[in-house]
Image (cartoon, grey):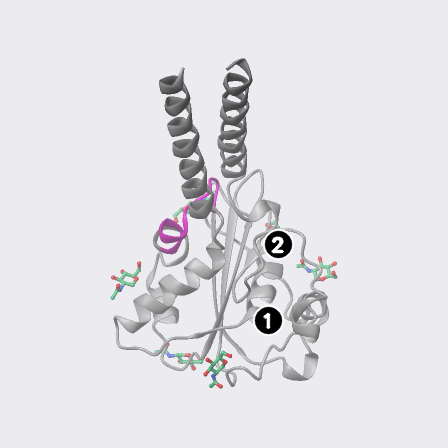
Amino acid sequence: MEKKLCWFQWIALCSFLLAAVVSSKHHGNPANDLVDIINKNRTSQRLRQLNNSPGLGCIALQFAEECKGNCTTNNTLNCHPPEDNFTEVFAPNCGVELPTFGTVSGLILGCQHKYLEPLEAFSQALVRDKNSLSLLSNKTHTEVGVGVIKTRKGSYWCVLFSTSDRNSSFVLEDLGQGIKQKKGCFSGTSTPCSSSGRRKTSVFSDNVFIACFYCILLLQLFYFLLL
Ligand SMILES: *[C@@H]1O[C@H](CO)[C@@H](O)[C@H](O)[C@H]1NC(C)=O
Ligand SMILES: *[C@@H]1O[C@H](CO)[C@@H](O)[C@H](O)[C@H]1NC(C)=O
Ligand SMILES: *[C@@H]1O[C@H](CO)[C@@H](O)[C@H](O)[C@H]1NC(C)=O
Ligand SMILES: *[C@@H]1O[C@H](CO)[C@@H](O)[C@H](O)[C@H]1NC(C)=O
Ligand SMILES: *[C@@H]1O[C@H](CO)[C@@H](O)[C@H](O)[C@H]1NC(C)=O
Ligand SMILES: *[C@@H]1O[C@H](CO)[C@@H](O)[C@H](O)[C@H]1NC(C)=O
């Protein structure tokens, strides 16, 4: 009996560790991961790193949300919201203080009919041509913001660059407390993504692992009681 108990304890410990590893792997923010990838690519070209701006990131997410449903069978995105929507819709939805609205100096959009991990999204959905490569490597940018949204029909990525003063542009009211964003992820924040920013199955598999863990604990308890 003692040996059996030991065996169950090992399984419980292993499944607990596995669950911890799985959840730590999937609970990141892909928008922040993309900013890291962009900055790594820039520093290896000896360009300066861009400031990760939550205000710009939130606007990028609004932009991506407006483009939902416009992904072609080619995985190209035809999406041109009117310029006014930046200051009249996106900024107010994010709570960006209007006087701090800076200059948007570049935009890269991407979409795919399936979800891509950040590194794949960078090379397969975002930086696919000369135009986006030159935006990525432009010396005059100072800030970047990334938005990621996943719908049933596809995933959308939006990268916005700015040449405004770091830290004093795209300032969020109340440190971003008033953001009306219930879906997706944006960069520059430690807030985890809302439901549709990342793969749904990961939440499911996390829960399966946790459920297994509790099952095994219960079994252990039964053995104890039988003793
Ligand atoms: C797919 O891409 C090709 C070449 O880039 C283009 O000619 C064609 O119109 C595209 N089709 C769709 C549905 O966007
Ligand atoms: C999405 O595509 C439709 C049809 O091509 C177009 O009329 C609409 O303006 C597009 N949406 C945006 C936000 O550009
Ligand atoms: C711009 O914002 C208005 C107001 O929310 C919205 O009705 C309109 O669809 C937006 N334009 C595009 C092209 O999405
Ligand atoms: C870099 O961006 C600035 C501001 O948008 C633009 O004026 C300039 O032409 C760009 N430089 C290159 C090399 O593309
Ligand atoms: C930066 O990214 C582009 C696009 O994926 C790639 O072609 C290039 O090799 C990268 N540069 C460096 C220095 O990693
Ligand atoms: C902007 O803020 C960050 C974090 O608060 C800080 O590390 C950085 O030095 C600031 N940059 C400038 C140019 O003030």
Q: Position of residue 14 (x, y in %)?
A: 38, 33
Element marked by disc 2: helix
Which mark is on residue 144? none
- Residue 125 in the figure: left or right of residue 185: left
Depth check: give the residue in front, 70 or 9. 9
State the image coordinates of residue 11 (x, y, percent, origin top left). Answer: 40, 27
Q: Is residue 75 visible?
A: no
State whether residue 157 appears in this view. Answer: yes
Q: Residue at x 44, y 42 (%)?
A: 20
Extent of the magenta region = 112-122
Question: Mark 1 sits on what residue?
Answer: 55
Q: Nearer the viewer, residue 71 or 8?
A: 8
Badge 1 or badge 2: first in the primary sequence: 1
The answer to which quarter of the image holds residue 123 is bottom left
Does the beta carbon at disc 1 come under 8 Å from ligand 6?
no
Vertical side of 110 occupied by 81: above or below: below
Q: Counting other residues with Cα less than 10 Å from the Cα at mark 1, is it few (<14), some (14-19), or many (20 or more)? A: many
Callout 1 amino acid: Gly
Q: Residue at the location (54% across, 33% down)?
A: 207
User: Badge 2 local density, few (<14 within 10 Å), some, or many (20+)?
Assistant: many
Q: Which residue is mark 2?
A: 65
**Which residue shows up at 30% across the image and 73% down it?**
43
Q: Amino acid at mark 2?
A: Glu
Direction from residue 158 to residue 65 in the image, left or right: right
Q: Are marks 1 and 2 in contact (CB under 8 Å)?
A: no
